[in-house]
Amino acid sequence: MNLLLIGAQGSGKGTQASVLVKRLGIQHLSSGDLFRSAIDQGTPTGLAVKDFIDRGELVPDALTIQLVVDQLKLPEFQPGVILDGFPRTRDQARALDKALAELGRGIDRAIYLHVPREQLMDRLMGRYVCVAHQHVYNLKSNPPQVAGVCDLDGSELVQRSDDKPEKIERRLQIFFEQTIQVVHYYRAQHKVIEIDGNQPIASVSTELLRGLGVAAEGAA
Ligand code: AMP
């Protein structure tokens, strides 16, 4: 099964991706994580994208498409993939469909996690991630047991450089102007499952799995 998770920053995509990985046994592929690891490793791609990411702008389509499509050919993504953060533009969506068709595959469902803009701002301002594995916390809705420390691996919690207020505003603007076009694109293919992301995490998961026609047991 090849799935897309579409949602603005702070909509809970990462959290729901973990639920889907466990429940469906397919791998998660996040374009943002790919870029961040390229930056950490100082690769040519990392150097080319760092400035865009720090400014909260989209990385140009050509670079992004190449990076993600190369990954999709890896063996671990052959049984299926949960794509998170890609595609973010109509051109990326078209390129993805073309690349998957060449691999004899296609997108089965595009899941849109809908959360109102004001709520997203609130969520993102309180978001912290651990330095070791990018586990996500929220000071209001999902705080760590010990302040500043990841519950899962004990590493330090930090705010992402693009989670500063003015950058958050810009990223949300890009989402509601450009990425929403990807929802329209897959809606025309009758592949969109729209989920209300403004409810407790477990309820979102239940609705999501129901939408995919998968039993909720084992979701938690
Ligand atoms: P994310 O973790 O998904 O919020 O991604 C972090 C940043 O990486 C974004 O703000 C963009 O600068 C860049 N990025 C991630 N995915 C894409 C994409 N599909 N197209 C363009 N830029 C992207």
Image (cartoon, rainbow, N blue to C red):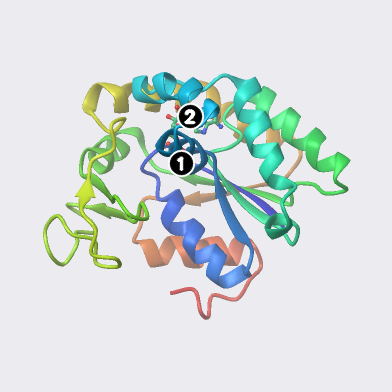
Q: Is residue 184 visible?
A: no
Circle 2 sits on which residue? Answer: 46
On screen, residue 86 above or below 50: below
- Quadrant of residue 55 in the image? top left
Of the 4 image quadrants, the one containing the C terminus is bottom left
On the image, the x and y values in percent for residue 205 come to 47, 64
Q: Is residue 190 visible?
A: yes
Q: 45 left or right of 137?
A: right
Q: CA distance from mark 1 to mark 2?
A: 8 Å
In terms of secondary structure, where does tag 1 sit?
helix
- Quadrant of residue 84 in the image? top right
Task: In this rendered view, identify the residue nearer to me: 101 or 149.
Answer: 149
Q: 173 left or right of 120?
A: right
Task: In this rendered view, identify the residue nearer to me: 74 or 123.
Answer: 74
In the picture as drawn, the residue positioned furthest to the left comes out as 147
Q: Which mark is residue 37?
A: 1
> Residue sitting at 49 percent across and 68 percent down?
206
Near mark 1 (Cα within 10 A), the count class, few <14, some 14-19 or many ≥20, is some
On the image, the x and y values in percent for residue 8 come to 43, 37
In the picture as drawn, the residue positioned furthest to the bottom comes out as 217
Q: Earlier in the sequence, mark 1 or mark 2?
A: 1
> Residue sitting at 36 percent across and 43 percent down?
10
On the image, the x and y values in percent for residue 29 come to 57, 49
On screen, residue 160 above or below 64: below
Q: Is there a contact, CB below 8 Å, between mark 1 and mark 2?
A: yes
